[in-house]
Image (tube, coloured by chain):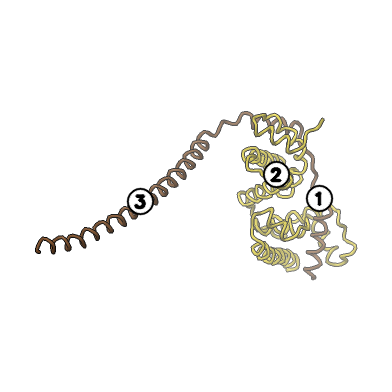
Chain colours: A brown, B yellow
Amino acid sequence: MNLDTLQTKLIAVARATPPNDRVPYAFEKRVMAHLMGRPVDSLGAWSTALWRAAVSCVAIVLLSGAWSLWSSHQQSKADFSQEFETAVFASAGSVDDAQ
Amino acid sequence: MERSDAELIAAVLKGDTASFEPLVAKYSPRLFATARRYARREDEIEDIVQEIWSKAFLKLASFRGDAPFEHWLMRMAVRTCYDFLREHQRNRENTFTELTTEEDDWLERIMSAPEQASDHGAAAKQLVQKLLDMLPPPARLIIQLLEIEDRSVKEIAALTGWSVPLVKVRAFRARAEMKKCLARIARDKYL
């Protein structure tokens, strides 16, 4: 027995008999009544707001951290040059004192 | 004057819930036809369509408008029907002994003289339905969309959210599964 023929024929039957698109009486009214009576998803709204706040906080923390690192790096550069200068002239100063 | 889908959606998003009703009236026939491909009982079909509309209402803000509303709605419909299939997996071990006399006669005719077997008989339709009920949900969905509705792989990927390679793999498996079910019917009939 040819299974391919059977399969082809069954598919042809399915294609030839599309389902009907009848809508039950007053279905739209029932759907609207269901949607209108739907409680507000307050938990969902809160969780969305909290997630947005969390993302903003993380962004601020990262920016603050980057700013802090950058400004301390600038400061340490200035400190280093000051210290180097002090060290150089300190030795020069001690030579003068010795003389 | 009749408002367009975009106008109705904008009104709903501004808080005018009543503007959703014309959309429900316009697209419900298509949704019912789709749901009837996957469920048999009218109460289940109505539940499926109501669920589709509930999801559409809740997620309406996510509709971007770059494709027609109908396409977006149909994607939701196919996924809801698939979820239904997965939740309500019937006993797929129907054997030949569960076929009616009419279905038996139709099978006899198709095997002896395929060109004479009718495409429209009630027995043929019932047999198709039983065959589809035997398939696992992914296979049934693929056979429905690919073979019966004659959609392309790309369309199916868009409707289901599956990747194109996954659709192809599932199509291959679905056809094999369908052949297995048919072979079981044939074996039960002739042994």
Q: Mark 2 — residue?
A: B65
As measured in the structure, the alpha-carbon distance from the residue carrying label 2 to the one carrying label 1 is 29 Å
Which residue is depicted at the point 69% across and 41% down? B49
**Tag of residue A18:** 1
Task: Give the residue type at disc 2.
Answer: Gly
Task: Give the residue type at disc 1.
Answer: Pro
Chain of the residue where label 1 is placed in the rendered structure: A
Q: Mark 3 — residue?
A: A71
Task: Please name whichever residue, A70 or B21, is drawn nearer the observer in this view of the structure.
Answer: A70
Task: Give the residue type at disc 3.
Answer: Ser
Do the residues at pointers 3 and 2 share their chain? no
Chain of the residue where label 3 is placed in the rendered structure: A
Q: Nearer the viewer, mark 3 or mark 2?
A: 3
As measured in the structure, the alpha-carbon distance from the residue carrying label 3 to the one carrying label 2 is 47 Å
On screen, residue A10 above or below A50: below
In the rendered structure, the answer to whether residue B41 lies left or right of residue B62 reads right
- The spot of residue B101 in percent (x, y) is 80, 55
Q: Please identify the quarter of the rendering in which residue A79 is found.
A: bottom left
Q: Residues within 10 Å of mark 1 (few under 14, many from 20)?
A: some
Let me know if residue B131 appears in the view.
no
As measured in the structure, the alpha-carbon distance from the residue carrying label 3 to the one carrying label 1 is 72 Å
Which residue is depicted at the point 21% across and 58% down? A86
In the rendered structure, the answer to whether residue B62 lies left or right of residue B6 reads left
Q: Residues within 10 Å of mark 3 (few under 14, many from 20)?
A: few
On screen, residue A62 above or below B10: below
- The spot of residue B1 in percent (x, y) is 82, 30
The secondary structure type at the circle numbered 3 is: helix
The secondary structure type at the circle numbered 2 is: loop
